[in-house]
Every structure is written in C-alpha cells, then in structure tokens.
Image (cartoon, rainbow, N blue to C red):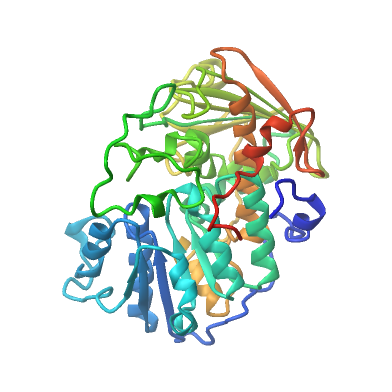
Amino acid sequence: MTRRMTRRQMLAASAASLGYLYTAPAFSAAKIQGANGKVYFAGIGIKGKGDSDIDNAAECTKIFGGEIVAICDIDEGRLNEKANQKGLYDRNPKKAKFPEEEFFSKAKKFTDFRKIFDDSSLLKTIDAFTVSTPDHTHTIPSVLAMRAGKHVYCQKPLTHDVAEALLMRDEAKKNKVCTQMGNQGTAANGLRRAAELLRAGELGDVTEVHVWTNRPIWPQGPGSRKEPQPAPENLSWDLWLGPAPERPYAPGYHPFAWRGFWDFGTGALGDMACHTLNMPYMALALKDPTSIEATTSGHDRDAYPKWSIITFQYPANDKRPPVKLVWYDGGKVPSPDLLAGAKPSGSGALIVGKKGSLYAPGDYAENGITMLGGAEKPKVEWVHSPGHFTEWVDAIKGGKPARSNFQDYSGGLTETVLLGNLAVYAADKPNEAAKVEWDAKTMTVKGRTDLDPIIKSPYRKGYEI
C-alpha cells in the first residue's frame, strides 16, 4: 500500500449516502443462510474490550448454533484464562449467563494472528472475526480476514491512521463482506433520536458543533515513556508491537496505556470521538474538512499531549451550510455561555443552530437531550436497533447491513476523527496553534509532507498487506 492513496480508489467504496434510513443490500461473499444458520467465529484480542466482543460471539453460537473455533492474544496468560472460562459475564460476574458452559475450551489458540490465515483448513471453518486489539493492529488482521471472504467486527477507532480507514472501507465493499465497528452507541435509541431531531430542522441551519470528553484517563504527555524492562514471560512483546517500529518493552504499554503513544494509539480523540462525535456525524455528514487547527499542551511526538482543542472547518453540502466543529479533551470544555450557563457534563455534544441549540450529555446521548434557546423537541421517528453486535450477526445471516459498517459509515467516521491528529501532531509546542489544510482528493496536507507518516504509518517488515 502506497503512503499516498488516491481519493478516487477509496471513494469508490463509499458511494452510499450517510443518510440514516438506508436501503442498501446486505453484502456478503459467505452468507449464512436462514434464521437458524450456524456462525463460526474467531477472536483476535480476547481481553479488555475483546472480552465482551468474543463473549457476544459466543452467545450468538448458543442462540443460532456454531462455535468459537479460534482465539488469539499475544498474552498467553490471558489466552489460557479465556480458554478455561466457564460461562459468559458481560463484564459483571453477578450476571453470568450459561455459567457452566465452556465456550472457548475447544478453540484453537494462537499468539500470532498471521498464523490463523496460514492455517487453510481452520480458515475454511471460520465465518467471522472479532478484532479487538490495540489501534495499531486493527487493520492488518481485518484486511486479511476480508480478503479471505470473512465478516469482521472491529473495535473503534476502526484504524490507526487515515489511509487505513479508507483501505478498510474499500476492502469491505470489494470483498462483499458484512462489517461493523465497535462504536456501540450507534445502536442506542438516544443517539439515533437526537440525530433525527437535528435532521428535522428545529435548530435551523447548524453552524457549530462542540464535542468534549473526560479522556485521557491514562498517562499522556511528554516523557510518558518509562525505562525499559524485560517483558513478562507470558507476553510476546515482538508480536504485540506488530507493524509498529521496534522499541524495548516498558511498563505501561500493555494492557492499557498504549492509547497515549503515537506508535500504538490515537490519543483521547481517537479513543472517544467515534462515540461522542457519532451523533452529529450521523446527523450532519461531517466529512472532508478543508482545514483543522489544534492547540495543545505540547508533546514530544512520542506521546500525545495532555490536552488539546481541535477546530475542524467543514464546507457546505447539499443539505447544510458550512459547519465549524470544536473538539476538547484533557479537561478542556466549551464555554458555559454556550450551554446557557450550565456546567458541562464530563463528556457530551452541543449542536448550535440559528434557531437554538441541542445539548446531549454523555458519550451516546444516553442521558437525554436538552433544547436551548427556544428550540423545541419535534416528534421524530427512528429505526430501533436489535443491538449493536446483533445487527452485525443479522447482516451475516442475510439481513440489511449493520449501521456502522465499514463501507458506508464507520470508515468515513474514523477518517474524519483521525484527521484531527494531523493538526495535533503539528501542534507540538505548548499553547501554540497549528493549522493544516486538508486536500481530500489527493489525501495530502498542503505543504506538509512531514505529516505523511501520520496519514499513513509505515509498517514493519513482516506485516505488509
């Protein structure tokens, strides 16, 4: 894959509208026919968020038949723990389901996901993959799976960089597989209703969007890298690095604080914007900004800054005028004046129109919405979801595409989110704004070839796709 990908190649995969009510056919090269069709799953990354993802897959096998046939994790301790697990817990042992059932004991175990794709006899039995690894290793197993005709559920953010988001979108369409990104709020009634309220036009022309988060909740900022130590015996450190540049193991990367490092994670923006920006993105089709400007606490280009404020400028489209989007993290929030004097919640979204504003506290508009400035709540209709993971399995079994599928939705959402990190990378000096101008047709930043590795991260030898 070249560092600079043409827009023409990738836009071929996203011709479908971002409109919420859609009628596109379900694409699948390996459709599981019928309501009672069995689905055979493999899980790559089976702890952290992967724990619930592969458990959701296991519950589907209980309902429809099928099996968990392979599990993979670079931590052998976690891998063995999962293989020996009885029951499903939904992250809460007090709510155990099928407490004596062994869903994973027969699954073939791997520490290197590439070996799954080398095992042709096993691969033939797999219908679908869950991919729940650190951000920098989302794309390679997902692409390998799609090229093998397998369906993919991948955690958010879909990819580590912008070019990968476009590649994932392209591969999903080309291989006609069913996909879903793990931004579960997309299926939530509160988020869907809020998006339809915006589309109803009660705010008039929307001019500004403000979105904020309480992240990061992990160490971040200059000097975050700790002194090297020998890797734990149960951890295959070189496999954990995957396509990223070599570096010695140090405490904190695994299993959580990797999010704060440029080589592995996508910072607070990448971690949470696929959730908190999701509602305005769904309503307003916030794609292809012409410029992005960031101010940060400063960073060393090894770890992300402790805080950032990022301003995106989106041109008008056929349904709305130009829109300014402002993202806040690390304790930064919008002015209380924008919220009619109310204290901003820990995370949330505010949409400002010419007739009033809509305030949605929380990451998924799950805490209700408040109309400000005289705006009313019109009655709207929205499509209820059977559940985020269930949408994906329904698509595999012959239903319509899952809402956050790669080609029509989550590829574009991830692209828009990760474009913000181009400006963050440029804004390495404390409190000194940096602005980049984005050319969506050529996939380049005007006059800034130094940002090419952030648009497309180079892969280490052995991980080329």
Image: 71 above or below 230: below
Q: How many labels does the image show?
A: 0
Residue in view at x 38 percent, y 61 percent: 53
Residue in view at x 21 percent, y 76 percent: 101
Residue in the foreground of this view, choosing between 140 and 273: 140
Residue 246 in sight: yes
Please identify the quadrant where the N terminus is shown.
bottom right
Report the side of 149 relative to 138 (left or right): right
**In which image quadrant can residue 24 be found?**
bottom right
Report the side of 250 relative to 266 (left or right): left
Residue in the foreground of this view, choosing between 208 and 307: 307
Residue in view at x 60 percent, y 21 percent: 427
Counting from the top left corner in percent of width and height, residue 119 is at 45, 78
Residue 188 in sight: no
Residue in the foreground of this view, choosing between 323 and 410: 410
Counting from the top left corner in percent of width and height, residue 196 is at 62, 48
Image: 25 above or below 436: below
Counting from the top left corner in percent of width and height, residue 426 is at 63, 24
Image: 169 above or below 252: below
**In which image quadrant can residue 46 be found?**
bottom left
Please identify the quadrant where the C terminus is shown.
bottom right
**In which image quadrant can residue 227 be found?**
top left
Residue in view at x 58 percent, y 81 percent: 30
Report the side of 39 relative to 255 (left or right): right
Counting from the top left corner in percent of width and height, residue 99 is at 18, 71
